[in-house]
Image (cartoon, helix red, strand yellow):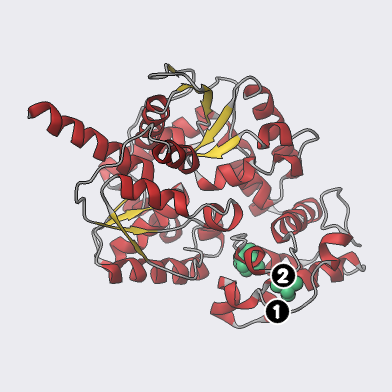
Amino acid sequence: MSWVTPHAPRPDELSSCIQCGLCLPSCPTFRLTGLETASPRGRLTAMSAVAAGSPVDGRFEEIMGACLQCRACEVVCPSFVPFGRAMEGARAEIAAQTSGIDRRLRRLVTARLLRSRMAVRLGTLAASIAQATRLTRLAPPRIRGNVAGLRPLKGRPPSIVGRTRTAEGEKRGVAALVAGCVMDAWFGDVHTATVELLAAAGWEVVSPRGQTCCGALAAHDGWADDTRKMASVNMAAFRDVDLVVVNSAGCGAHMKEYDHWVDGGEQLASRVADVNEVVAEAIADGRLPRLSTDGGLVAVQDPCHLRHVQRITDQPRTILAAAGLTAVEIDPNGLCCGAAGIYSLLKPEMSRRLGSSKAEQVEATGASLVASANPGCEIQLRTYLSQLGHEARVAHPVELYWEALQRAERRAAVR
Ligand code: SF4
Ligand code: SF4
């Protein structure tokens, strides 16, 4: 049996690969294993085999499942193979053609629970209690590792949803902040910094009640119908705003590709911007200030979905420089940190090797501050830095900039 869904890798996507192999050195799983089947080219060959009639079986699932969906291969491909789209199609086929308790559990988490604000809040309450009582030590090792990388959680965190912040100065328009699933419950300080910076840059900021999870994790795991539903809900929720701002790189990358999932999805996708883009632009045209203080070194980690998918690299560095920080590079190759959504739970050994390597690169810089614009990467970095005994703080670039501005204001007030 070949493909059975409309999402399957398309013939033009597969035939665009000219088998040159230029993507191989950029692929983290190929670099670690040396296996052709763990390379972009090998994965595309496996998809072509299924398109020609081979079954979607356990071997195919293994080859596709080992991919991080980091899309480093797309950046270097001379033939512009849309690897991320093809891989999402292959995952949709696996979800449609295979079954089992683990699949149902994955769908429950990525496609059902994450889009329920109530479920995320209940999970956050339980996790905060486990953190406070150190019950996390009793969790299975696979989960314990990830929990160690969480920020300290509040049992009942405030939500950004339904709030409005008026613009300061001349109003540029209305910007909606995407609350996200775990961003709203676990990364409230990033939301606060985002809202305040957008308002200072002239945007009225809202976060509509009708929104839901962006659907990135569901899409990466193959739950196409759920992904489409989430995209449709968000298209309605964000219909009337000028700009849709996202402060999680993975969510922004997915929302910029809503046209893959819903007819007319480009109407929302074209208004989506990562917060790094919006804030860096405001700094460049003088609506937000540049500080000249010496804030020390900050190691910059480029999340794959910011660097490879959204092609955003300069903007976080502009923001960190405006915060008075000196950016140091940790990895010129931009290899994935191994977080990759739920990959760290599904492929813990590969994830561990990549996470450890990234933490060692950070440690080598000597910086005690790390900037990362994606929640999964932040958790992964904190997890493996703590295993090295390196107590670096990991935070979002806009959070570091907002904190620096507040410090500067306090200093100016006491003069
Ligand atoms: S998406 Fe990343 S892990 Fe997957 S084939 Fe491309 S480079 Fe390799
Ligand atoms: S670089 Fe592009 S065309 Fe070349 S093997 Fe990789 S995916 Fe195929």
Location of residue 195 with respect to 334 vertically, above or below: above
Residue 251: give its label: none
Location of residue 227 with respect to 238 vertically, above or below: below
Identify the mark nearer the N-term, 1 or 2: 1
Q: Residues within 10 Å of mark 2 (few under 14, many from 20)?
A: few
Residue where numbered disc 2 is placed: 78
Location of residue 161 with respect to 137 vertically, above or below: above
Residue where numbered disc 1 is placed: 21
Task: Look at the numbered disc 1 and say if its residue's Cβ is closer than 8 Å to ligand 2.
Answer: yes
Query: What distance separates the C-alpha of mark 1 from that of mark 2?
Result: 10 Å
Please state, as top left, top right, bottom left or bottom right, where the C terminus lies in the image. Answer: top left
On the image, the x and y values in percent for residue 406 come to 23, 33
Please state, as top left, top right, bottom left or bottom right, where the N terminus lies in the image. Answer: bottom right
Q: Label 2's element?
A: loop
Q: Residues within 10 Å of mark 1 (few under 14, many from 20)?
A: some
Identify which residue is drawn at 77% across, 54% down.
89
Identify which residue is drawn at 57% across, 31% down.
244
Task: Look at the numbered disc 2 and say if its residue's Cβ is closer than 8 Å to ligand 2.
Answer: yes
Describe residue 241's horizontal placement relative to residue 20 as left or right. left
Give whichever of 79, 61 is nearer the camera. 79
Residue type at mark 1 is Gly
Residue type at mark 2 is Pro
On the image, the x and y values in percent for residue 367 come to 25, 62
Describe residue 86's horizontal placement relative to residue 413 as left or right. right
Q: Label 1's element?
A: loop
Quadrant for ligand 1?
bottom right
Q: Is residue 212 visible?
A: yes
Location of residue 357 with respect to 126 vertically, above or below: below
On the image, the x and y values in percent for residue 163 come to 45, 18
